[in-house]
Image: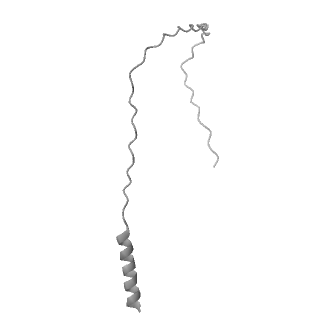
Amino acid sequence: MNHTLLISALLATLSLAACDKSTDVTVPATPVAVPGPAGPQGETGSQGATGYQGETGSQGATGETGDKTTVIVVPAEEAK
């Protein structure tokens, strides 16, 4: 009985594999837009208004010059 079951399973597998047909899917090409002839040129637009020129700032105050001293600030230690 084991041989009969094995042979029938093998025949069923082969018969199903023989029926499997691959299907080819063809994707339609994307249509390409072709430009037509150029139309007549339109009228030229009017020139826009000129923007407002801002005012110039005043000169800042001149400070006193230092004595060429360099100050180094050491960062505080982090708490552990």
**Would residue 12 appear left or right of 56 to someone viewing this image?**
left
Q: Quadrant of residue 66?
A: top right
> What is the x, y in percent for residue 4?
39, 89
- Foreground pick, 63 / 58: 58
> What is the x, y in percent for residue 16?
39, 73
Q: State how many labels appear.
A: 0
Vertical order, 74 against 22 (above or below): above
Q: Residue at x 40, y 82 (%)?
A: 9
Vertical order, 79 against 56 (above or below): below
- Foreground pick, 46 / 66: 46
Colour scheme employed for the rendering of this structure? one colour
- Foreground pick, 79 / 28: 28
Q: Residue at x 56, y 30 (%)?
A: 72
> What is the x, y in percent for residue 47?
53, 8
Q: Residue at x 38, y 30 (%)?
A: 34
Vertical order, 28 against 6 (above or below): above
Toward the right, the furthest residue is: 79
**Would residue 49 appear left or right of 13 to someone viewing this image?**
right
State which quarter of the image contains the N terminus.
bottom left
Q: Quadrant of residue 15?
A: bottom left
**Would residue 1 appear left or right of 49 to someone viewing this image?**
left
> What is the x, y in percent for residue 75?
60, 37
Q: Residue at x 39, y 48 (%)?
A: 27
Toward the bottom, the furthest residue is: 1
